[in-house]
Image (cartoon, coloured by chain):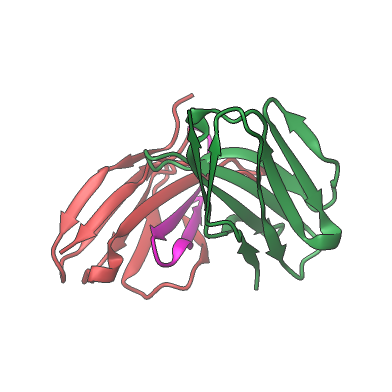
Amino acid sequence: KAGVTQTPRYLIKTRGQQVTLSCSPISGHRSVSWYQQTPGQGLQFLFEYFSETQRNKGNFPGRFSGRQFSNSRSEMNVSTLELGDSALYLCASRREGGTEQYFGPGTRLTVT
Amino acid sequence: AQKVTQAQTEISVVEKEDVTLDCVYETRDTTYYLFWYKQPPSGELVFLIRRNSFDEQNEISGRYSWNFQKSTSSFNFTITASQVVDSAVYFCALSLNSGYSTLTFGKGTMLLVSP
């Protein structure tokens, strides 16, 4: 079974721009979560989607948003990028009823 | 609020040594899950083990073993006979029964195994 895939793997953007990251979960997994990893703050939960609905949201500003499609693929969007948004963005999927999450390779975003 | 503390920032061992990674957690919930993840240089978080709050039985899986003690809120992870390929950052994480997908992570412990 294929794992979680994320595209693109690397991205360089300029302050003020917006960016969209994509995540395809493991087949059959309907829950998709997003995490931000930075050297200073570590791994922080952004949000979770299940059946196209946002179920949980972490403590991030409204510039961070996401959505999930009917095939469970998810996208997250960051608008008006700031230098502090430079991070590794990890997506994870989980099967319904399961507890462990399986992570993708991440998208490394650099904001200059 | 939940909190996970990994006091060891970095550990260096020589191949074949045993190494224990410490994890202390805080939560007021009675039902929760604890996890260990490994993050090699490639960046992907790899799921290793899971334990729920009702099961304090300690287990061994290959070279991995874990010691879960609710009395001290600790969930320590041991690698026996370490190998160079074990070099990575190891994260301890906690999720509540009501929100499986909201993982609270510790800051991680970087393990360096030298030949």
Query: Chain in green?
Result: B
Residue A83 vertical position relative to residue B53 in the rendered view, above or below: below
Residue at 44% over, 27% down: A2
Of residues B22 and B73, the one nearer the viewer is B22
Of residues A107 and B24, the one nearer the viewer is B24
Question: Mostly what secondary structure, the magenta segment?
Answer: strand
Residue at 86% over, 41% down: B57
Residue at 36% over, 45% down: A106
Residue B54 in picture, x, y percent from top left: 85, 51
Residue B27 vertical position relative to residue B108 in the rendered view, above or below: below
Residue B69 in picture, x, y percent from top left: 82, 53
Inspect the magenta stretch and tell me whether residue A34 lies in it.
yes
Q: Which stretch did the figure color magenta?
A: A27-51
The part of the image, by quadrant, that contains residue A6 is top left
The part of the image, by quadrant, that contains residue B37 is top right
Residue at 44% over, 67% down: A41
Quarter of the rendering occupied by the C terminus of chain A: bottom left
